[in-house]
């Protein structure tokens, strides 16, 4: 089973391998429960700061996962290590939930074009993704002095459940596919007419 440190290293390596630039990398730990959380932002490698179109990627890791990844299964709690056990031949059935959130800022002249924005984004995601795990959209709105409701930005979010078994090559392959898709989506998002280009 992969450890937390191995997973985070592989995530960052695979992002860079496909042409993404990870930044604002954070490792948080909750002191009482020892729950760990990894988050980072990433953008296209060729883009300069500030990154207006970007993706936030992260996952959580509880203390039982830390124990299993460091010391193996908890069979030793119930019998001696020298005893033969059916679990010796099995990989741990452990998954992480990799959260992916696209942050999309809208150009001022398109702030009330909800139908156009929705249809363009959904077309982009369905064209770029050959699966049904399409991100759901969350609209962030503001109200101007005239009382009009306008779009300020959009979050498009979905997640992947990824096994963290002993097969490290499979894990790398899955991450490569996911991050290639993220890169393609970012490139397509940047080409949309309503995307904010600068602050």
Image (cartoon, rainbow, N blue to C red):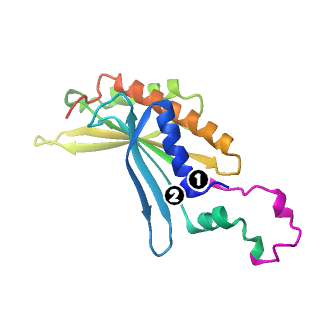
**Quadrant position of the C terminus in the picture:** top left
Q: Position of residue 184 (x, y in %)?
A: 47, 27
Is residue 106 visible from the viewing direction of this image? yes
The residue singled out by tag 1 in the image is: 96
Image height of 90 relative to 188, above or below: below
Of 61 and 119, nearer the camera is 61
Element on which disc 1 rests = strand
Q: Position of residue 152 (x, y in %)?
A: 25, 39
**Residue 168's image quarter?**
top right
Q: How many marks?
A: 2
Asked whether the residues under the numbered discs 2 and 1 touch, taking CB atoms below 8 Å apart as contact, a structural biologist would say: yes
Is residue 159 visible from the viewing direction of this image? no
> Which stretch appears magenta?
77-95
In the picture provided, is 72 more to the left or to the right than 130?
right
Q: Position of residue 69 (x, y in %)?
A: 64, 61
Badge 1: few (under 14), some or many (20 or more) residues near its Cα, within 10 Å?
some
The residue singled out by tag 2 in the image is: 60
């Amino acid at each position: 089973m992969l450890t937390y440190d191995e997973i985070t290293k592989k995530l960052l390596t695979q992002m860079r391998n496909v042409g993404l630039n990870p930044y604002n990398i954070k490792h948080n730990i909750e002191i009482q429960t020892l729950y760990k959380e990894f988050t980072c932002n990433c953008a296209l490698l060729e883009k300069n700061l500030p990154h207006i179109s970007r993706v936030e990627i992260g996952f959580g890791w509880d203390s039982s996962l830390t124990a299993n990844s460091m010391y193996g299964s908890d069979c030793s709690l119930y019998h001696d290590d020298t005893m033969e056990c059916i679990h010796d031949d099995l990989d741990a059935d452990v998954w992480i939930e990799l959260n992916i959130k696209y942050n999309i800022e809208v150009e001022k002249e398109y702030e009330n074009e909800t139908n156009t924005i929705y249809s363009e984004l959904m077309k982009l995601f369905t064209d770029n993704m050959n699966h049904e795990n399409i991100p759901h959209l969350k609209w962030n709105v503001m109200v101007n002095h005239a009382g009009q409701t306008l779009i300020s930005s959009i979050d498009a979010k979905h997640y992947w459940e990824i096994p963290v078994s002993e097969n490290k090559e499979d894990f790398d392959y899955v991450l490569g596919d996911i991050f290639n898709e993220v890169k393609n989506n970012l490139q397509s998002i940047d080409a949309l007419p309503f995307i904010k280009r600068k602050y």
